[in-house]
Amino acid sequence: MTTRPAPIGVSARSLTKAFGTDATALDGLDLEIRAGAITGLLGRNGAGKSTLLELVAGFDRPTSGTLLVDGEDPFENPVTAADTQLVREGGDTFDSEPVADTLSWYADAREHWDADLASGLVAELGVDAGTKVEHLSRGQRSAVGAVIGLASRAPLTLFDETSIGMDAPNRATFYDALIADYAAHPRTIVVSTHLISEIEQVLEDVVVLDRGRALVSGSADDVRAGGLTLTGRAGEVDLVLGGREVLARRDLGPTAQVTVLTSPGDELAGRARDAGLEIGAVGLQDLFVHLTRRSGASAKEES
Ligand SMILES: Nc1ncnc2c1ncn2[C@@H]1O[C@H](COP(=O)(O)OP(=O)(O)OP(=O)(O)O)[C@@H](O)[C@H]1O
């Protein structure tokens, strides 16, 4: 009988990864990825998500700073590599062989591989295991990645844009399988994605990378609690805001809706309630768009 593996965490301190003098993908990143949680790794194009995941998987070495996976340096480390499964777009498969060959390679390589889960999920995602990988569509290739990531049951599983190209029913199947398998076999899962609103309910923790640094990180609930919307008569809304920074504003006739950042102890919500304004939550996707746009604008002003 194999014992159930313990989930493992990741810690980065002043982590920097530069590619020559052209690009600094990670720029002094400080970060904790909680063991045993599903973390969403969010960020605009080029924010450094794939670079971070490849460092965590031990495929590359940081330029400076510290990166620890389960307390160890992951670079070319066979101990952490055995516990880590990175699923990258269009990679890590035997392209000129049938899908079944790739799956049987992982079955041999991965200690906790679940063959029944793999074959069930391949069928559910509509992939023919007899087809050569190079003959699959982009979405079908992504589906094979999803199967490898889930059936490996690695204590640290990293999905880098795995849902890319998958159609909506297959993405739903992937998310459902991820939640069900995580519930039955808790482990550390990191999901890098641009499809924030559809995966929001799956995420327990969230990290927003912005130009190689963590702009926001924490529990998804705490991150969400960092913003709110106020809706009401425009004059009342402006009075309650009192000149405070607004992330987004929509005016519809006499009514205005604004999105603002907030923090514990902020009296804004109380003032809004007293003024009869409607207070709403901000979804992660909206908050992400506002925060990363604002950060991009202030970077332009500084330069
Ligand atoms: N091998 C490389 N050589 C040179 N620059 C690189 C290399 N890999 C990544 N970069 C640069 O590092 C930065 C971060 O890239 P990365 O792929 O990590 O971003 P990402 O957040 O995954 O982006 P996306 O959402 O577009 O996939 C980008 O500016 C990219 O051009």
Image (tube, rainbow, N blue to C red):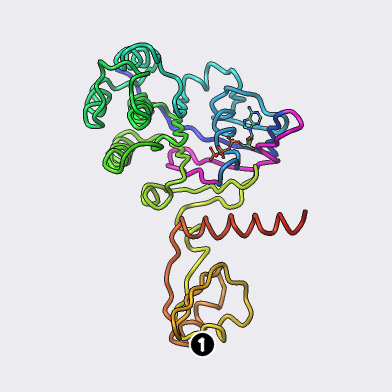
Which residue is found at the position 52% from the left and 51% from the top? 218
Q: Quadrant of residue 147?
A: top left
Instruction: Give the tally of numbered discs.
Output: 1
Look at the image and give the residue range highlighted in magenta.
20-43
Q: Is residue 111 magenta?
A: no
Q: Quadrant of ligand 1?
A: top right
Question: Alpha-carbon neighbours of circle 1 within 10 Å: few (<14), some, or many (≥20)?
Answer: some
Taking depth in this image into account, of 88 and 183 the one nearest to the observer is 88
Q: Is residue 37 magenta?
A: yes
Where is residue 23 drawn, in percent x and y? 70, 35
- Secondary element under disc 1, as helix, strand or loop, is helix
Which residue is found at the position 26% from the left and 20% from the top? 115
Q: Amino acid at mark 1?
A: Glu
Where is residue 263 drawn, in percent x and y? 56, 67
Q: Quadrant of the N terminus?
A: top left
Q: Quadrant of residue 98?
A: top left
Q: Is residue 116 visible?
A: yes
Q: Is residue 4 visible?
A: no
**Mark 1 highlights which residue?**
236
Where is residue 46 drawn, in percent x and y? 60, 40
